[in-house]
Amino acid sequence: MYLLSDLSVDDRLIKAGLELLSERGYKGATTRAIAERAGVAEVTLFRRFGNKANLIAEAVRRMGNTFEKVAMSPSGNLKADLLKLAAGYQRQFEAGGAAVFALAVEAAQVDELQEAVREALEPRIRAIHDFFVHYQHQGKLRAIETDIMVNAFFGPFVGSAFFRQVAGRGPRFNLEEHVDSFIRGWST
């Protein structure tokens, strides 16, 4: 329980929701258990978020706020912007831990969760896509199917985070080396 925490009520609910999602899965992370761990009445969760899926979707929105802002305002310096995106994405995986992977599995199985998460991710996906298109139009990145480029950039983060979660350790991941190699492979 987080009663003595400096976290706001919403933050406590989100933290409890993600922890319980990781520990028990979506169905096992009941609204009662989430509220209890957050130190609030169950009705508070419903008043603030409407339902459990919306609570988890809000957690997803908050996880990517930082790097989404970078994607929405490219500076013109491709390498600097890619490093900021990479650092933000890596922080998201580190902060989310096992919850990120649990969420992926659970969203594939629970329609209401999948819909809420998809809605939460849509602005981020669009911003990231537009970021890469921006640099393609500037002639700094090759003009190929943007989704392929996005997956090539972000895929290694997922693989590295997966190995760290499953095996307890993963391959060393160097952001600067990744960005440099991405630029060498995808720039014009």
Image (cartoon, grey):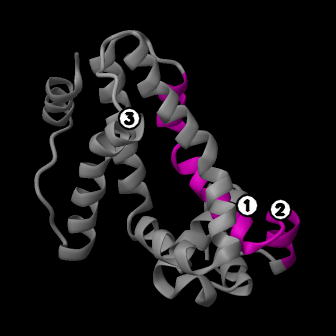
Residue 91 in sight here: yes
Provide residue 23's location: percent of width, then percent of height.
47, 83
Q: Mark 1–mark 2 contact, CB under 8 Å? A: yes
Q: Is residue 114 above or below residue 131?
A: below
- Residue 46 part of the magenta-drawn span: yes
Nearest to the eye among marks 2 and 3: give it.
3
Q: Which residues are magenta?
A: 43-72
* Residue to which mark 2 is pinned: 48
Q: Residues within 10 Å of mark 3 (few under 14, many from 20)?
A: few
At numbered mark 3, what does the secondary structure look like: helix, strand or loop? Answer: loop
Rendering quarter of residue 36: bottom right
Residue type at tag 3: Glu
* Residue at the farthest front position: 144
Residue type at tag 2: Arg
- Of mark 1 and mark 2, the one earlier in the sequence is 1
77 lies left or right of 131: left
Residue type at tag 1: Val
Residue 12 in sight here: no
Main secondary structure along the magenta-highlighted residues: helix
Observer-nearest residue: 61 or 43? 61
Nearest to the eye among marks 1 and 3: give it.
3
How many numbered discs, if any?
A: 3
53 lies left or right of 157: right
Provide residue 80's location: percent of width, then percent of height.
31, 19
